[in-house]
Image (spheres, rainbow, N blue to C red):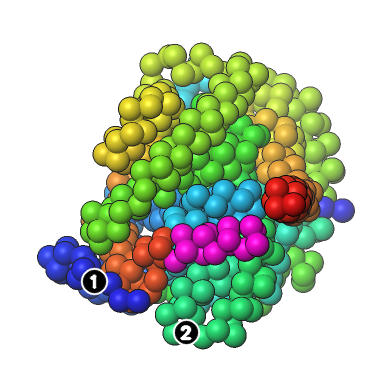
């Protein structure tokens, strides 16, 4: 099955390639002269843009992989079958991005494998490391059918199909664990994280916000694919995804408010400070507005409005992850931090890499036009059910 | 017995001998500002130098100017790793490079460290530092003189900074004994000390203890509760196994239920179709 339409804008591809290539020399500078040469990180602010954006936001934005796989394969929502494969590809690339970013950020990336042999089971970061490593492998397996289909390898295809359900369940379990333990990591900082965010239920809030952003990312990426590659996904699927989000976000908002009330710190949100501003920014942009908009039937009838509302959820999540891991986390006294341009360049380069691979995969592998195969599979299975 | 150091702020004269001794013992002496080393100390507008702890300065004396007892005075406080009883860094470290050993020190193992810097973010005293200018960077902090190969404690010696202190402002010994010694000093001259042993209870207790003539928050010591900062994270980590089993069971259950309901439905439809055919 070959694509009829030549995919992608050549200019877009060219720009992405330039951004990706531009980050290469910066990688080299880092390995020759150390992290100080390419970043504004310091003892007072040891984690910066890469951790907040590439790790914290990146992992959450890859949540579409496990939420959609779970919805389709476990909860039997077959309607969403066409978005599973692109969601899994996005997640797979997302996790590779995280690992690439860690190759820059971590001081001794050549020892990352130490997490496999030296266990500190009390460390939330150990849990994240183990889950991210295993989940990346699970995602590779979940995505492998696209490759095997393309190569017409029937035996491995059958093997993967046979373990599909255990694989999806493993993915859901691993994601539940590490999405939440990214929140657990911050529980070590009760003195430096602002009380507006610090709560013992932070892991739960992390999980809920990740689950909510999963369908939003699916809307976002499939709308973009429609624009770039021209595979039109039925509006019914997009509207369905949009309809779920208010429920999850509503629960998330409720948890957040009740938690602040129980802690007696709701007043902080209503007293003027840069923190309360950041708090309202993430709540209004990423939670309240999307709950309202996705609940309106005419928003769900418009591809454009669905797309932009999904973007609100995504931006809100990114603000939240920046808040908890950077902006509302006090640096050491006397430290200020704004990312070095080379930090931005590395992050931009990594995103460009992911987009280029995504576009290449779309050309070579059955990703989007998988919908037609899925529909035929559905028809066949319906016929079989009748027979 | 856990070892500890009692730092009596009243006795410190700010000579910074401890800073030099630390660098000499830990082979950082090439960073001591002398003509031979060609290291210049920069003017910070104060005798306090260097301005902060770094990968090459594991301990330093902080100079605080303030008024008490009707006089403007200098108060000198020694900064270094506090060697917590429940160290956040050791819980944070994914590979266990930082460890609290029963003797008291929080040790660091270069052979395990991956350079993730979680310890630096987690430390409530803002102590661990990082070699930002090195292509192969390590975490650096006071090891209580237990660095392998430079281990003074294993020899039964006191740490280099304590050894060098000319005024006995630093006293090395058993933690419990030092706490009662501190209490004795406070009781003996209540006018010279505030009634607070910093480190006795802070974040569950530390191996470095301080007594001072002024409240500690005025000397830049962070105000911390007596609960270890690791409590919430440890509770959440305790839920990992139950969550793992629970989620796996729930997902399998949901899958099984839905599949079963569908096959029942298919069977019913089947029999209905057969019935219609008859």
Which of these two is toward me, B167 or A207? Answer: A207
Tell me which label, 2 or 1, sits earlier in the chain: 1
The residue stretch that appears in magenta: A373-387
Q: Quadrant of residue A38?
A: bottom left
Residue occupied by mark 2: A152
Residue count near mark 2 (Cα–Cα under 10 Å), binned few <14, some 14–19, many ≥20: few
Position in image of residue A330 (x %, y %):
46, 37
Rendered residue at 36%/65% (across/down): A369
Give left or right: position of B93 versus B197: left
The kind of secondary structure element at disc 1 is loop
Whether residue A92 is visible to the viewer of this picture, yes or no, is yes
Q: Is residue B125 above or below residue A372?
A: above
Give left or right: position of B166 versus A361: right
Which of these two is toward me, A197 or B207? Answer: A197
Rendered residue at 38%/27% (across/down): A297
Position in image of residue A2 (x %, y %):
30, 76
Rendered residue at 77%/60% (across/down): B101
Q: Quadrant of residue B205?
A: top right
> Disc 2 sits on a residue from what chain?
A
Q: Are marks 2 and 1 in contact (CB under 8 Å)?
A: no
User: Is residue A122 found inside the magenta-colored segment of the image?
Assistant: no
């Amino acid at each position: 099955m070959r694509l009829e339409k030549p995919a992608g804008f050549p200019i877009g591809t060219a720009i992405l390639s330039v951004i990706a290539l531009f980050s290469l020399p910066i990688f080299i500078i880092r390995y020759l002269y150390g992290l100080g040469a390419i970043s504004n990180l310091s003892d007072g602010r040891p984690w910066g843009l890469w951790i907040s954006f590439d790790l914290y936001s990146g992992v959450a934005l890859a949540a579409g992989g496990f939420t959609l796989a779970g919805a389709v394969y476990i909860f039997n929502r077959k309607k969403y079958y066409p978005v599973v494969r692109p969601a899994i590809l996005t997640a797979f690339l997302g996790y590779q991005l995280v690992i690439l970013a860690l190759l820059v950020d971590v001081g001794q990336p050549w020892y990352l494998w130490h997490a496999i042999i030296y266990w500190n089971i009390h460390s939330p970061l150990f849990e994240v490391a183990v889950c991210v490593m295993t989940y990346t492998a699970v995602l590779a397996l979940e995505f492998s059918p696209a490759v095997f289909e393309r190569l017409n390898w029937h035996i491995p295809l059958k093997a993967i199909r046979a373990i599909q359900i255990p694989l999806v369940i493993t993915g859901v379990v691993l994601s539940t664990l590490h999405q939440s333990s990214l929140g657990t990591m911050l529980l070590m900082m009760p003195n430096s994280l602002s009380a507006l965010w610090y709560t013992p239920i932070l892991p739960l809030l992390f999980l809920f916000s990740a689950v909510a952003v999963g369908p939003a990312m699916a809307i976002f990426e499939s709308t973009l694919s429609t624009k770039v590659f021209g595979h039109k996904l039925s509006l019914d699927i997009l509207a369905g995804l949009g309809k779920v989000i208010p429920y999850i976000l509503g629960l998330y908002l409720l948890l957040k408010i009740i938690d602040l009330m129980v802690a007696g710190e709701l007043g902080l949100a209503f007293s003027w400070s840069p923190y309360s501003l950041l708090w309202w920014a993430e709540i209004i942009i990423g939670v309240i507005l999307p709950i309202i908009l996705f609940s309106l039937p005419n928003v769900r009838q418009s591809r454009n409005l669905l797309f932009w509302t999904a973007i609100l959820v995504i931006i809100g999540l990114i603000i939240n992850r920046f808040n908890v891991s950077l902006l509302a986390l006090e640096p050491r006294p006397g430290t200020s931090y704004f990312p070095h341009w080379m930090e931005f360049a590395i992050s931009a380069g990594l995103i460009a890499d992911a987009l280029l691979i995504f576009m290449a995969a779309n050309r070579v592998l059955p990703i989007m036009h998988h919908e037609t195969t899925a529909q035929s599979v559905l028809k066949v299975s319906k016929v079989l059910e009748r027979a | 017995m856990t070892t500890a150091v009692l730092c009596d702020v009243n006795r410190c004269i700010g000579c910074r001998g401890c800073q030099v001794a630390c660098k000499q013992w830990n082979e950082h002496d090439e960073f001591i500002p002398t003509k031979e080393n060609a290291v210049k100390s920069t003017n910070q507008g104060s005798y306090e130098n260097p301005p902060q702890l770094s990968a090459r300065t594991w301990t330093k004396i902080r100079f605080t100017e303030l008024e008490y007892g009707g006089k403007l005075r200098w108060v000198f406080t020694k900064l270094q790793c506090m060697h917590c009883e429940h160290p956040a860094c050791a819980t944070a470290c994914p590979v266990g490079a930082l460890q609290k050993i029963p003797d008291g020190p929080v040790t660091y193992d270069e052979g395990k460290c991956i350079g993730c810097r979680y310890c630096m973010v987690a430390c409530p005293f803002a102590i661990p530092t990082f070699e930002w200018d090195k292509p192969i960077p390590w975490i650096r902090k006071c090891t209580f003189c237990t660095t392998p190969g430079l281990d003074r404690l294993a020899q039964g010696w006191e740490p280099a900074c304590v050894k060098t202190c000319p005024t006995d402002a630093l006293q090395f010994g058993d933690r419990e004994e030092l706490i009662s010694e501190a209490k004795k000093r406070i009781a003996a001259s209540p006018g010279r000390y505030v009634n607070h042993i910093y480190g006795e209870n802070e974040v569950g207790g530390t191996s470095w203890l301080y007594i001072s003539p002024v409240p500690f928050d005025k000397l830049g010591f962070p105000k911390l509760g007596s609960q270890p900062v690791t409590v919430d994270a440890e509770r959440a980590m305790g839920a990992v196994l139950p969550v793992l089993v629970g989620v796996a069971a729930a997902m399998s259950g949901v899958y099984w239920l839905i599949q079963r309901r569908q096959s029942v439905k298919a069977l019913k439809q089947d029999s209905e179709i057969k019935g219609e055919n008859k």
